[in-house]
């Protein structure tokens, strides 16, 4: 069975004040050392990989490796295992650092999907979020990607940022639409512990719980009316151009992650590399650093992840994958939520509604406990 | 034989809080070498953790010291420490009854404060010789001359030549010891008379049974004797007698009239050794017991439940153990729909309740939920039957009630006259009936009120303190039952009555109480998946309503990068949090919500 490949790139030109992903400003020459370490990891993969049908460069800012670096890694990957024809190959880029030439290089290396961190269509808000790019740069980056022949483009849009109004959401959605991108990831800002936003108490400036919910519901509507259909709590696509790689996470499919802080789910176990760039660079065999994180893919994990999707859980698939699951009990537990309009249920499926997505933690806690 | 008593001094130390009572006690212990410096832990007399932290004394304690005075003679001192809260007023009076004198500690910078007076009057009432000392003279703000005048003017005892000391730095402690010798009289009593010994405290020792602290008034008590507790008639054979050393008991062949010490007699429960009772010789009993004995009865009742239902047996064991030491604690099993299995406990007052709760939690590692405190009501039913209710759950259907009575107390409030207005206002709010005002002198007043016990068990003491800047003090005694209009107030969450939140209240106070209760619960119940209506009702009639809105946002928006374990842990943590709350039907109620309604009083 083909799996997903995730390459983490722990570099950023500047660290955003809300971000708690593992990344830092690279030291001189570190990108090259890192590219080599990833190539070494690819040579020494200690698992049997039948084939790969999605590759995702995430970060950090993967585009900081340059088109050349991305190309070398893709080449290295193809030497380790077959990359199936039509594989989805995504690179996350900052509009600022994704230069026209680099995009061309990536495209010719096989990259067919770019995800830009737009975040907002207001320059003022971008500044507030500590972003280095402008709205104009988003437009030119997207245009460059389209001209280079990249088929799939996704934009990130942050919700519930300080001072955000419905009008800001309108502006961002219409920008996405005008640029003709097929995919939008729109997620509520979460103030993570230890980040500058958390230390500065930015939460106090953010919309309150009710307002956050309003903004989210508004965004879902605005995106849908612009043709972006919701398929996951925070993901929207036109014409079915969903993120196939991310879909593997939500469907409990196997994937292999390379790089510090990257997670894998393979052979039924979850594993990860420690958040330690220096260690990763120094290791003769980076896989020696891999940590075991226990078994994965059990029923409660499956329910937790599938309930994030609009298509929800199919009873048929569920009983096929987990013959021991108690559908009766699941339905019984779901009923109060159904009554409250937080989920819908028919003979085939359970799925959360938009209101249900907003309070999905509580619902998942309840339903996944079967 | 009277010279046996000549060199005994039985005394206590009285002071306003923070004026240095415990520190002075420590210094006295140190300077009489009762405790070596090495063993000296701050504030030896307050040896329960809670006492040390709160700076209050809960149980009476006593210690015997030996002092070689300047006159060349060796004296035997018994220092008896007293609790400092109205809940324990009776214990205080018994401790004072065991003494001949009191050392009054006054802060030389702050001067006379509320408790200075209240305690002094109490001491004088017990005919104690009061010898003042001015403490904290090391402080820059100390003005011993002014404070000495104050003591003479206000209390009316000579103070100009009172020792000026610093208990903290140890200055002039020697002078205090000399004053104890010269000013405090030696005890009186007939050694040949039948035994009369006053019990002023006791505690349970797992090896020897109850150790009884006594002051022998007449006669002699020694091992082998059969003693009788005059109130209960229970008899025991004395196993051991002795002095109360600072860290250990010191066996002696006997205790005679005038002495303070302990008796061990294989007594199984402190219930047989009630504070204030008289110990006598079973073969040659005294004609009459010592005056002032009173049965100490719990006044406040509340349900105590383990937060984790599985800990019920642990709670029972813990209560049984605490009761061995504390005869004023009572408990019996009860069940609540909301809280499961627990106990209805009786306490002397709210502080006593808090202390017991804290000890259960700390010493026995239990997580507790306590229901709103209640007093005991007398109800006469339409069929003529009379019942006593201390638990709102058992409150009968109003249609079946012919009349209801609630307990009243007679309260004496000591205060500087400046606060009379504030105090009258407070008493009025608490349905107090004014009796009279007694001017003790130009500035000191004693107000007398009749108050429903129900109104003072919650936070009357705290409110009194805050409205008089801590100056007023008060004392009360039960004064029988009076007819009253009572109603039972129920709280409904999501339409269901939560029995643990019900309480009995004076009818006219029901509306404001209901409103406050609903508001308070709204503050403490977190938003949940569904809207939660909070209602307060009398019978079937809703008189207050609040709503906890449904939660709108509780979502992990971002779930990329494949770190599924972290998401799972977040959700598990959330689930744990929910588990710590009580599930009442579909509503999760945190423990704090039950606690918050206990403190409804004066905000």
Image (cartoon, rainbow, N blue to C red):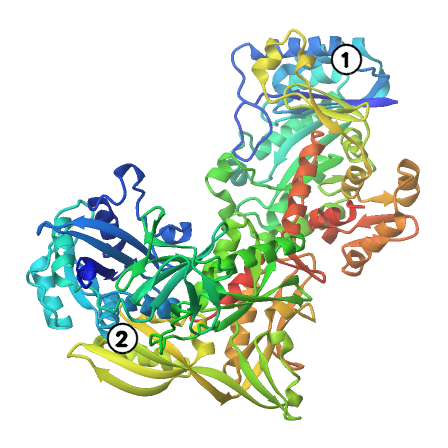
Q: Which mark is residue B212?
A: none
- At x 32% / y 61%, what residue is drawn? B82
Q: Quadrant of the C terminus of chain B?
A: bottom left
**Residue where numbered disc 2 is placed:** B414
Q: CA distance from mark 1 to mark 2?
A: 84 Å
Residue B302 seen by the camera: yes
- At x 22% / y 76%, what residue is drawn? B418
**Residue where numbered disc 1 is placed:** A46
- At x 49% / y 35%, what residue is drawn? A196
Give the chain of mark 1. A
In the displayed structure, would residue A268 be above or below residue B283? Answer: above
Question: Can you give x and y, in whole percent of width and height, for residue A62 in the image?
Answer: 64, 21
Residue A339 placement, left or right of B312: right
Q: Quadrant of the N terminus of chain B?
A: bottom left
Out of A113 and A123, give the one closest to the viewer: A113
In the displayed structure, would residue B35 be above or below residue A89? Answer: below
Question: Can you give x and y, in whole percent of width and height, for residue B109 in the image?
Answer: 15, 57
Residue A153 placement, left or right of B83: right
Residue B328 seen by the camera: no
Question: Can you give x and y, in whole percent of width and height, for residue A267 in the image?
Answer: 82, 23
Quadrant assignment, res B105: bottom left
Question: Can you give x and y, in whole percent of width and height, for residue B29 in the image?
Answer: 24, 48
How many other residues sit within 10 Å of disc 2, few (<14), some (14-19) or many (≥20)?
Answer: many
């Amino acid at each position: 069975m083909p799996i997903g490949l995730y390459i983490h790139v722990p570099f950023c030109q500047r660290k955003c004040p809300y971000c708690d992903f593992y990344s830092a400003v690279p030291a001189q020459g570190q990108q090259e050392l890192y590219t080599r370490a990833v190539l070494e990891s690819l040579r020494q993969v200690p698992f049997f990989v039948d084939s790969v049908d999605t590759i995702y460069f995430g970060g950090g800012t993967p585009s900081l490796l340059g088109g050349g670096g991305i190309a070398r890694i893709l080449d290295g990957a193809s030497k380790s295992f077959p990359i199936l024809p039509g594989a989805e190959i995504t690179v996350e880029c900052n509009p600022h650092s994704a230069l026209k030439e680099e995009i061309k290089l990536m495209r010719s290396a096989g990259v067919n999907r770019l995800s830009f961190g737009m975040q907002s269509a207001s320059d003022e808000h971008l500044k507030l979020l500590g972003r280095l790019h402008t709205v104009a740069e988003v437009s030119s980056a997207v245009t460059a990607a389209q001209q280079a022949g990249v088929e799939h483009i996704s934009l990130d849009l942050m919700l519930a940022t300080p001072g955000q109004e419905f009008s800001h959401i309108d502006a961002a959605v219409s920008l996405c639409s005008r640029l003709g991108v097929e995919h939008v990831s729109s997620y509520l800002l979460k103030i993570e512990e230890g980040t500058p936003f958390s230390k500065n108490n930015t939460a106090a400036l953010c919309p309150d719980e009710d307002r956050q919910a309003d903004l989210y519901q508004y965004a879902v509507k605005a995106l849908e009316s612009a043709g972006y259909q919701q398929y996951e709590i925070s993901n929207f696509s036109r014409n079915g151009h969903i993120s196939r790689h991310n879909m593997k996470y939500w469907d409990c499919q196997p994937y292999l992650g390379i790089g510090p802080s990257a997670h894998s789910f393979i052979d039924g176990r979850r594993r990860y590399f420690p958040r330690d760039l220096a260690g990763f660079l120094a290791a003769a065999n980076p896989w020696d650093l891999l940590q075991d994180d226990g078994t994965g893919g059990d029923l409660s994990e499956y329910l937790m992840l599938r309930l994030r999707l609009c298509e929800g859980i199919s009873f048929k698939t569920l009983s096929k994958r987990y013959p021991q699951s108690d559908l009766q009990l699941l339905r019984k537990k779901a009923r109060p939520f159904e009554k409250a309009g937080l989920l819908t249920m028919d003979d085939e499926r359970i799925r959360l509604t938009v209101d249900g997505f907003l309070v999905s933690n509580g619902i998942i806690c309840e339903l996944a406990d079967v | 034989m009277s010279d046996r008593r000549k060199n005994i001094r039985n005394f206590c130390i009285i002071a306003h809080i923070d004026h240095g009572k415990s520190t002075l006690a420590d210094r006295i212990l140190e300077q009489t070498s009762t405790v070596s410096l090495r063993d000296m832990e701050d504030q030896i007399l307050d040896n329960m953790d809670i006492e040390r932290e709160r700076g209050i004394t809960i149980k009476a304690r006593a210690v015997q010291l030996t002092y070689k005075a300047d006159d060349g003679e060796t004296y035997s001192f018994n220092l008896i420490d007293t609790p400092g809260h109205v809940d324990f007023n009776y214990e205080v009076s018994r401790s004072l009854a065991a003494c001949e004198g009191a050392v009054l500690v006054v802060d030389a910078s702050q001067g006379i404060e509320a408790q200075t007076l209240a305690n002094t009057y109490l001491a004088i009432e017990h005919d104690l010789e009061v010898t003042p000392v001015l403490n904290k003279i090391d402080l820059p703000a100390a003005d011993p001359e002014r404070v000495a005048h104050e003591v003479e003017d206000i209390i009316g005892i000579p103070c100009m030549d009172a020792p000026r000391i610093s208990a903290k730095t140890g200055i002039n402690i020697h002078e205090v010891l000399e004053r104890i010798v010269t000013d405090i009289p030696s005890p009186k009593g007939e050694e040949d008379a039948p035994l009369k010994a006053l019990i002023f405290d006791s505690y349970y020792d797992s090896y020897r049974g109850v150790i009884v602290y006594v002051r022998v008034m007449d006669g002699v008590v020694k091992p082998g004797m059969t003693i009788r507790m005059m109130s209960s008639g229970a008899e025991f054979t004395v196993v051991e007698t002795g002095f109360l050393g600072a860290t250990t008991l010191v066996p002696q062949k006997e205790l005679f009239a005038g002495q303070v010490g302990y008796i061990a007699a294989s007594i199984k429960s402190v219930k047989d050794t009630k504070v204030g009772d008289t110990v006598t010789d079973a073969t040659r009993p005294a004609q009459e017991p010592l005056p002032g004995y009173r049965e100490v009865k719990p006044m406040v009742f509340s349900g105590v439940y383990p937060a984790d239902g599985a800990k019920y047996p642990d709670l029972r064991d813990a209560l049984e153990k605490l009761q061995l030491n504390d005869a004023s604690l009572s408990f019996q099993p009860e069940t609540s729909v909301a809280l499961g299995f627990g106990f209805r406990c009786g306490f002397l007052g709210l502080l006593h309740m808090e202390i017991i709760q804290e000890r259960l939690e700390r010493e026995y590692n239990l997580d507790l939920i306590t229901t709103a405190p209640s007093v005991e009501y007398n109800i006469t039913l339409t069929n003529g039957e009379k019942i006593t209710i201390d638990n709102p759950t058992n409150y009968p259907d109003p249609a079946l009630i012919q009349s209801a009575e609630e307990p009243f107390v007679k309260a004496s409030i000591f205060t500087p006259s400046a606060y009379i207005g504030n105090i009258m206002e407070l008493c009025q709010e608490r349905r107090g009936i004014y009796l009279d005002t007694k001017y003790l002198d130009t500035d000191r007043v004693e107000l007398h009120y009749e108050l429903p016990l129900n109104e003072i068990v919650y936070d009357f003491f705290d409110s009194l303190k805050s409205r008089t800047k801590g100056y007023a003090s008060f004392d009360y005694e039960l004064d029988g039952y009076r007819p009253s209009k009572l109603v039972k107030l129920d709280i409904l969450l999501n339409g269901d009555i939560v029995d643990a939140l019900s309480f009995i209240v004076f009818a006219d106070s029901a509306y404001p109480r209901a409103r406050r209760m609903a508001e308070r619960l709204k503050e403490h119940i977190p938003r949940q998946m569904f809207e939660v209506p909070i209602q307060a009702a009398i019978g079937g009639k809703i008189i207050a309503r609040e709503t906890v809105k449904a939660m709108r946002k509780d979502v992990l928006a971002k779930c990329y990068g494949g770190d599924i374990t972290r998401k799972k842990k977040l959700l598990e943590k959330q689930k744990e949090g929910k588990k710590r709350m009580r599930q009442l039907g579909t509503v999760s109620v945190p423990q704090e919500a039950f606690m918050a309604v206990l403190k409804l009083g004066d905000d």
